[in-house]
Image (cartoon, rainbow, N blue to C red):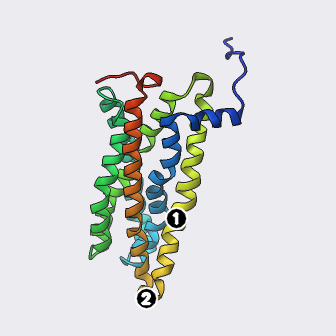
Amino acid sequence: AQSFDSAEAPALLASFRDFLRHPVLRLCFLFAGLTSCTSHALISWLPSFMMRVKGMTLLDISAWYSVCFSVSFGLGLWLGGVMGDRLGRRTPLAYAFVPAVSLLIAIPFMIMAIMADSWPVSLLLWAIPLCMAGTFLAPAIAVVQAYAPPKQATVFGSIYLLANNLVGAGLGPLYVGTVSDAFKPSHGAGALSFGLLALIPVILLAITGQLLIARAISRNRTAGFAPHD
């Protein structure tokens, strides 16, 4: 039977320190949550938005929204992996550019979905942001694994997912809910529209973060990605 390397793996705190010392991984850690804020916020609030603002019934949600979300977000996860893999063969910068471009594409469709007159049109428009919001995960994990030392690959991946979930899942839905509550006295059920629109500045910050990650990758290829271009 084969056995793992008997050399002792670095301690958790040492791995965390090593992760944050790396210029590319440090940026990944800082912007992980911002990039995932959109997906977590949409997952949490879109059903309520479609019911309160667009008039969907609970039956409509179960019959139509659930299918739209599953297909769109799943397609985004697959598309991010495929595009990152194919374009990454030409240049490793693609692992940051794919999420950045995807988030940029999502913005106008979010605005149109919020302003749509009927829930079927709104739901069709939301399919694009839901898809685009899922594209970042596979390229992000690829970046982390590319720069992780072999003995720290698993814990480096865990550190990234920790940052991703603490900020994205912890603060994304809370942020949208807080903005929505602020507008509720003046706009009633429509206040949730403002909460979702408030994601746009977060998306722009996340895009900026992805561009900074791309610049860091271009300066640190010898430590991880080999230059393909």
In the rendered view, would you say 227 is above or below 177?
A: above
* Residue 44 in sight: yes
Q: Amino acid at mark 2?
A: Ser
Residue 149, by quadrant, is top right
Left or right of residue 128, residue 170 in this image: right
Give the number of callouts: 2
Which x, y percent locates residue 108?
27, 62
Q: Is residue 61 above or below residue 142?
A: below
Where residue 24 sits: x, y (%)? 47, 36
Q: Nearer the viewer, residue 55 or 23?
A: 23
- Taking the image as drawn, is residue 79 in sight? no
Q: Which residue is mark 2?
A: 186
Spot occupied by residue 132 in the image (x, y as percentages of width and height): 35, 51
Give the number of the disc on residue 173.
1
Q: Which residue is at 49% across, 36% downward?
A: 23
Helix, strand or loop at label 1? It is: helix
